[in-house]
Image (tube, helix red, strand yellow):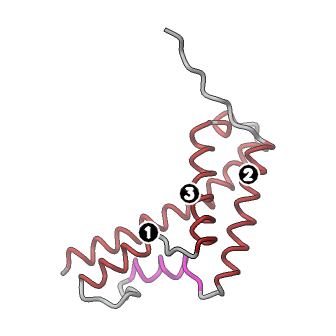
Amino acid sequence: MMGWRLLADAVVLAHAAYVAFVVFGFIAILVGAALDARWVRSFWFRVLHLAAIGLVLLEALLGVICPLTWLEDALRVRAGQAIYPADFIAYWTHRLIFFAWAPWVFVALYAGFTIAVAAAFWLVPPRTPHRQRK
């Protein structure tokens, strides 16, 4: 049972890392653009970042539970725990990334954030990868 709980906690941390990538990645893009940093135009970083928030928006529009949330819940049930964790790391991670708001609020927030990320993609375009010719 302890193994399932640890796996569930690992999923929570992975979920928090995903959220951090989306939020802090956007902040980094804005700061990097203001400082004219070269890395901010990395094609793959920018595409992955846009895809990450796009996936969140798609899940919200479709009313689908995030696969990471579903996985964590399933692991907690296997561990004999309540769906909301009680240990320190999982508890605070949940408090930081989950809010009890109406679903339409999340859709609006995700849509607005996706639009902002897409606008940054357009205003500060990434360098397209060059293919080497043989």
Query: Which of the 4 image quadrants contains residue 115?
Result: bottom right
Q: Earlier in the sequence, mark 1 or mark 3?
A: 3
Q: Position of residue 80 (x, y in %)?
A: 24, 88
Q: Residues within 10 Å of mark 2 (few under 14, many from 20)?
A: many
Q: Residues within 10 Å of mark 3 (few under 14, many from 20)?
A: some
Please tell me whether mark 1 sits on a helix, a strand or a loop.
helix
**Mark 2 → mark 3, Cα distance in angstroms:** 15 Å
What's the residue type where badge 1 is placed? Pro
Residue that mark 1 sits on:
67
Q: Earlier in the sequence, mark 2 or mark 3?
A: 3
What's the residue type where badge 3 is placed? Phe
Query: Does the CB distance between marks 2 and 3 fall below 8 Å?
Result: no
Residue that mark 3 sits on:
21
Q: Residue furthest bottom?
A: 82
Residue 119 vertical placement versus 110 (above, below): above
Q: Position of residue 7 (x, y in %)?
A: 28, 70
Q: Magenta includes 44?
A: no
Q: Main secondary structure of the magenta part?
A: helix
Nearest-to-viewer mark from 2 and 3? 2
**Mark 2 → mark 1, Cα distance in angstroms:** 24 Å
What's the residue type where badge 2 is placed? Ala
Residue 82 vertical placement versus 49 (above, below): below
Q: Position of residue 76 (x, y in %)?
A: 31, 82
What's the residue at 41%, 72% (across, down)? Answer: 12
Please tell me whether mark 2 sits on a helix, a strand or a loop.
helix
The span shown in magenta is 88-99
Indicate which disc residue 118 carries.
2
Query: Which of the 4 image quadrants contains residue 125?
Result: top right
